[in-house]
Image: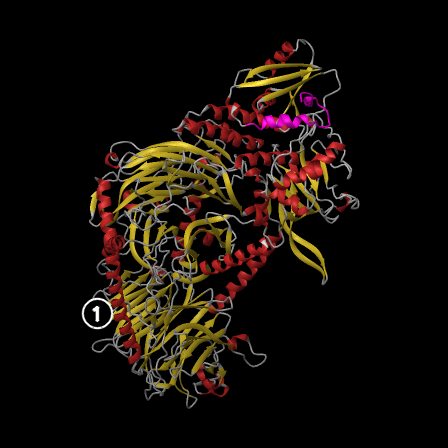
Amino acid sequence: MVLSAVPQPASQPGSRMSRQQQQRTPLKHSDNVVEVKSKFEAEYRRFALKRNGPGGFREFYRLLQTIHRIPGVDVLLGYADIHGDLLPINNDDNFHKAVSSANPLLRIIITKKEDEPIVFATNSLQRRKKGLGLTALRTTGSGSTHSRNKAGLMIGLPQNFRQISSIIDVDILPETHRRVRLHKHGTHKPLGFYIRDGVSVRVTPQGVEKVPGVFISRLVRGGLAESTGLLGVNDEILEVNGIDVAGKTLDQVTDMMVANSHNLIVTVKPANQRNNVVHRGSKTSMGNSGSVGSAGSTSSAPSHDSPSPASQSNPITASNSIAEGDSDDEDDDGDLILENDCLAPFDSQRVTNSNNTNLNRDSPSNRPHNFTVVRPLPQSLSLPNSIGTNLSDSSMMISNQNGNPTHTSSSSQESMREDGNIITL
Amino acid sequence: MKRFRRHGQESQRDKLKQELFQFNKTVEHGFPHQPSALSYSPTLQLLSIGTRSGAIKLYGAPGVEFMGLHDENAAVTQVHFLPHQVELVTLLDDNSLHMWTLKAHKGLSELLEIGRFTLTGPPGALPSVTRVTAVLAHSSGELLLLGTEGGHVFIVEVPGFRELEERNISLDQVASSVPEDYIGRRNLEHVEALQENPVNPNQIVIGYGRGLMVIWDLEKQCALQHIPATQQLESVWWTEDGGYILSSHSDGSYCRWMVGGEDENEEEEKSDIPYGHFPCKAISKIVQLPTEEGPPFLLFSGGMPRASYGDRHCITVIHSKTHIALDFTSRIIDFFVIRDGPQHTGDPSALVVLVEEELVVIDLQTEGWPVIQTPYLVPLHSSAITCSHHVSAIPLKLWERVTAAGDLQKTHYSKKPWPITGGQNLAPDPPQRDLLLTGHEDGTVRFWDASGVCLYPMYKLSTAGVFHTDADPNDNMNQGTEGEWPPFRKVGCFDPYSDDPRLGVQKIHLCKYSGYLTVAGTAGQILVLELNDEAAEQTVEAKVVDLLQGQEGFRWKGHTRLDVREEPVLFPPGFQPFALVQCQPPAVVTALTLHSEWKLVAFGTSHGFGLYDYQQKNNVLIKCTLNPSDQLAMEGPLSRVKSIKKSLRQSFRRIRRSRVSLRKHHVNNAAKLQEANARLEAELAEMELAPVQRKIEARSSDDSFTGLVRTLYFADTFLSDSSHNSPSLWAGTNGGCVFAYMLRLPPVENRADEPVTAQQAKEIQLMHRAPVVGIAVLDGHGAPLPEPLEVAHDLARSPDMHGSHHLLVISEEQFKVFTLPKVSAKMKLKLTATDGSRVRRVGVAWFGSSRSEDYGESGLVVLTNQGDLHVVSLPAVKMQVQYPCIRREDVSGIASCVFTKHGQGFYLISPSEFERFSLSARYLVEPRCLVEVPLRSGSSNQHRPQPDGASSALRNARQDSEDAEVLQEIQKSLEGDQSSFLENNVKSAVA
């Protein structure tokens, strides 16, 4: 059970048990103490940490060095998050995130810097199978079998890796079309493109026909669209999040795109047809994903028979993937809800409220715009503690999310959705 | 099997939808935009107006109205009723003629186009040969005489439009019977006028543009007489005894010519330039009508001295020693006179004038010739409409008080009944009394009776009196001073020039139970008014509210606050202001709501919102919603807009001053205009080739105007815990943020002393950040909470306070239901993400089933920026029906839309017209009327007796009044209890 914390690619059954622990009722949550269990080489230490106590990453680092009696040894810290992923602790923000997400146990793994670099990865600790309905079925059905066979994807360090886009549904689209997903969250970059009306030429049984179409007219330098390299000027836009744009006005298409901007999937017919993704037969129906990193590093696109973790949670058909992208409930819970508990006359109410708030507050913080929350309320309301901590938590989580190496973004979406289920159900 | 059952349920639901929802555009209220032609049928007593957009509208007795639209998108230049028939002919500026008729169908009349016709000339002829310039509907009812630009008169048999070539009056025929010296010099070109001899239908006079008039005998096909006027002819009138012809001319003169003298070349008997020796403008139409005893009435339009009064739009009426130049507010389209008597041949009783922006009817039988108030065709836009507010089911008490206040404002109108009484109004009495309130740019609020087909003006409230304005109270331009020449008298109410744009009314909220009204305007002013049956002199105390709350680094560059009059002001009976809040910065008020039970008013601008206790005249809450990075909101974009507006206004005034008569040769002008338009269109098309780009960007908190408050809502609900409900205030912003405040109201007995407090309870930031356009709370049954005092008046079921309440947040992009008191998302319906349309207008409405009396559902009525109407079910937020309603390009139409509580709505189709529509299958207000075909006595003689029409009109009127009495009694007995309850309630609240 303890061993499961070791960063081995293959998952251990023990981690399920630990997950069950995590799923205990959040009664202990309100305790101000975090149980910490840290491992360095073969040694374990257990100690407690004040949840709201002062101190940041530096102090914690020194504390661990003291506890493990390895002063002066340069080490890397990692912790197992609630999804079973091994995540790094290297600054105040992700340290606070680690502490706040400990539920109730915080498992720390310490490795020497001289050692082989630690692999922060998804599925390094087995992902929990949670959630309801199709999602769970799909994950267990297709995803986990693959993950057993295959090691987790090697992922670079946070500062030089972030998924911002992907080509999806390659297997079901005509080769001349391209379906691109832009991940707006977790980046400060603007989406950065403009669209215009134009004339598209279609071949019909009656011959060549000119029909009105919508085209990309301009890419903003340094914007998300440009940096992906997947969208180009004069590409014709065919669909937005699975909805055909034929017959819609430029303004309607604009509004649809803006409304879907947090998870925009555009199907285009590229003006330049030479760089199309070559569709390699239908040997497997799984090879539907190619991803492109931000730094222009053509991140060794996995071959079609070794699907990336991202594709595991992706459904196979276009309609599904779009549906998933579209029926995203993440924005439901994305609504920030501040409840002012100081008004609540009953204490019991207050407790549950604050807990709920806590949960509610978890997922939206993926978004970079939290200024509205952080902005002090001009009426100097006495915010309850839980909200206060949440405020700081959320800001930390942003950076954490940005630098989160272990999630390809589709899986992080899924996890958010799962979080969402906790809240809504 | 499960699937099968579900299918069954769905089809059942579809059936139910058909019983609940049904889309109809029912009636157009207001004054037709750009009218271009007028006609009147004395026998039918119907008035007809044609417009530049090709519409034709018929009006009779109040409630009797018909509308038709020509398929061609061409202006109607002339309308003529066929005498003693139910047919009428229209001439469009594409030279086509159209025949319309009123057909009875299932006991109701319908206006139908039954034929169209275009003159075809001989091959190779110039188009001017067949270009129709004058139309005469012959009194036989069988002939139509068409004078053309080429000088020919074509004769056509109607209603079938059969050309009677052998009877045409060709140029050659005329030329041969006119002395040589008039021929040549293009004297016989351009038939300007055609008139029939009132005593001999075989004789007509043909007036040519250069002035020559020829009297022609249709039977003998020869000229009887020619009248050699030398001035450009404008119009011709044949006096009723057939003895004289009056001609009016472009130099402002008119002449009288004797008909049938022995002398072939009759000298003009009398010539006069009424407005004298300096050059005058043309007299475009002249009419002379006899009276039983005494001198005749002479009426003519135009003829003003060009230099000094060339910009006036006047009709001169001369009777005996009385001579008045009626000075209208806009260009005169046409006029006619209604005559007394069963055969409409008696004394002139009323002058009906159609000017470009209104219809004015003048009582010619009452001393001083007062104006008769029109029951329809009222210019909604006498000052531009800036907002509107609809209140359904007004209690009788309030209705009577508003009516009484309005009646006091109408004392200057004639007491005579409306003189146009054709047709029978068969529409059932409206099920309830509805008020439509329109706010105007000049700071007035007009109250309209919107219960039925006629949008009738009830009462006008002016808010300008509270403030010092630029308007000079002594600036009464035309109070007729003694001895002024011409003797002007201003008539009409169209006045688009606002003295101070800051007075503009932006938001209105009326509580129909308590009679409290709140009105908010462009300069951040919020007035609270109450209905008082007596005039009162009082000072209105102003309370300045700083919405910035110490936000620094901003500078308001917009307009300044309005100056409040500090001395007591005399307010006439009606709604009288007693409290005033002025926002600082004085930005336009963007949201407003009133809770008369709690005596609170909430208001919002682009900077924040506030809550005002109008009992204690005290501010309860101020919240700044401004985003510190939003510079635009601070500087007040209005500063720019205002200057544009100012310059526009000035240039309009200039145009108005320098306006010259455009009527002459309007055919040529129209052609030129069309050419210019075509050029412009081509240019526009070219411009459109340059691509319009749209930026795709996620909304961020830095966007402009995120703090603008879009909606405010009061609710008594569960804000903090699920067992104690409390008053609350909700506010939604442009940035997708919802604020909720818990209000603590002192008990009623201490309401006047103890303070009201507000504490922030919740803040919701929608992730998609779309503007929040509506907030509602649904009770335990999923029904929207009733309006304040509605339950107290026993007019609504009290909300279910046991089940859990839900919060409905409507953004421009989504409908979202949250649980209460703990706010968590429960259901949603995405609109923009799926079809690209955005919510522009939303209202809660109740839909009754058309099949069963007791079944109904609440729903959201939504108008999108695409102009589509949707109904969304409550509380499940499921799309029910969708209908296209307004063109998506018609932005102002979409913005002006207002919904009623029973699934109807209004939107502006032009600055002066509301279109009324209905989404409900049960409630429908539409004209239902019958016009009977006049009896024909066979002979082609004119002035047949019309006993049936007159008596039916009488009968109708009698029936109407009886109905009204019965209805009033029933209503009184029904509402007696309620109104007394209201009084008690008000008393106890005041105590």
Q: On the rendered structure, is B295 left or right of B813? A: left
Quarter of the image holding residue A38? top right
Please state the horizontal and vertical placement of residue B712, each as a whole percent of the image. Answer: 40, 41
Tell me if residue B889 comes above or below residue B754 in the rendering: below
Q: Secondary structure at mark 1?
A: loop
Q: Would residue A217 be seen by someone viewing this image from the given angle?
A: no
Say which quarter of the image contains residue A302: top right
Check residue A9 for magenta coloring.
yes
Relative placement, left or right, of B956 versus A286 is: left
Image quarter (top left, top right, bottom left or bottom right) of the N terminus of chain B: bottom right
Most foreground residue, B43 or A359? A359
Residue stretch in magenta? A1-24
Q: Residue type at mark 1: give it.
A: Lys
Tally of marks: 1
Q: Quadrant of residue B729?
A: top left
Please, which chain is the residue tagged with disc 1 on? Answer: B
* Residue most extreme to the front: B1
Q: Is residue B539 above or below residue B930?
A: above
